[in-house]
Image (spheres, rainbow, N blue to C red):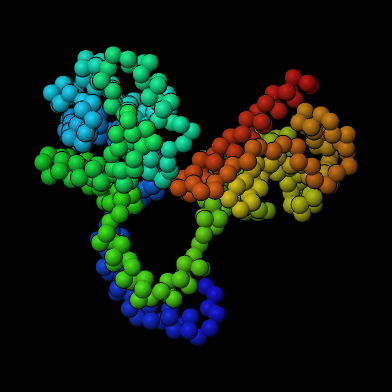
Amino acid sequence: MIITDNSDEQALKEFLLDIQCLDELIPWTGKFNLFDVLKVARNEIRHSNMLSWLLDPRENHGIGDAFLKGVLQVLVKNDNKDRYDVFKVMLSDMQSFSVYREWRNIDILLVSQEEKIVLAIENKVGTHEHSNQLNRYRKVLEEEYASYQRFYVLLTPDGELPSDEVNWDNLSYVDIVELLEELVERYPLQTDVELMIKNYIEVVRRDIVEDHQLIEICNKIYNKHRKALDLIYANRIDGKTQISETIIETLNILGKEGSIIHGNDWGNMVFRTKNMDKLLPLLKTNDSSWGSRNIYSYWLSFDGNRFYGVFELAGHNVPKTDMKMMQRIIKELKPNDSKLDSFKYKRVFRTKWYDLKDVEDIVNETEKAVRSAVNELLDMEKTLIDRLNLNK
């Protein structure tokens, strides 16, 4: 941490001597929460998965159709345009509904063929409507379910009004939390199910909707120790560091899984494979272009919030038989490259860019991107080896 003057040091001392002020945050930070462990608290897809599970009357949560019935009740109660038949909707057989995820890109779709009712939910946690989504989804459902009673619902943290107010209803995560709190009180749930739903309620209240008590406490602590907290924030581990560390950790995991050979002998974003080691074996001494035993490398080129994968050859001190193999590889991957026998480094393949800017769950999305980039390189390798065998 960079301390620029005595006042910075004094501010940090005062904060540490008053560290018990953070105890007021324990109700929000001191308890185990499954969604925090999985790092999916603000991940829109994970919220849609959770809600789909809760809305499905035939799932194993133990609340039957109560959550679905509660959601429909809120929508019917808030209907001021007389669009819904209260008797038809509330007396429907809720057990007849089937739940679909991402049907025609609609986040959550519930369909009852028996009752001729369809409920579409577009879920927005950290984003807003775009690309005329609501109109497109409505037209799809009008065509596919022309004879059905149709509910169109935009679910947002604060009940944001939809662009198409004539056809679409709005629902807030406050509504969701209040319904779930009521159900937890009313139903004797299995211990693990109760824990999961209560964890979900907590994370929604903390991270999705405004918890006014939490906001008040945070503001009080911040106003008291503004300088120290600003200094801590300025020197925190940022998103770029998280991405870099997650890339290295994921490569370590892939190495342990056996899909790549990863170690820190030359660079922590560099790796090899068993198949390529057979084609281009390690030197006996550290004499390659990189000052290592590697005469080829797979590596991830990291630039801020994005990276891409590289397959590169090192041309110095390469034995003749290995150079012949390199030349064959170059002809396959870079057929227009005429410099085949005199090079220090030569990139012969590059993956697409993997952009992690503005992602909500940095760790999870980075891990997925690394696995995807490595798979792209391994697919290239497999195709290359197949071609080399054919060309022998």
Residue at figure coordinates x 41%, y 45% from the top left = 126
Q: Is residue 194 left or right of residue 133?
A: left
x, y percent for residue 16: 37, 78
Which quarter of the figure has residue 88?
top left
Residue at figure coordinates x 60%, y 47% from the top left = 306
Q: Quadrant of the C terminus?
A: top right
x, y percent for residue 202: 26, 51
Residue at figure coordinates x 68%, y 53% from the top left = 266
Q: Is residue 328 left or right of residue 191?
A: right
Residue at figure coordinates x 83%, y 37% from the top left = 323
Vertical relation: 275 (above or below) 177? above
Which quarter of the figure has residue 227?
bottom left
Q: Nearer the viewer, residue 291 or 137?
A: 137
Q: Nearer the viewer, residue 284 or 292?
A: 292
x, y percent for residue 65: 18, 29
x, y percent for residue 66: 16, 33
Q: Is residue 1 something one can see in this rendering?
A: yes
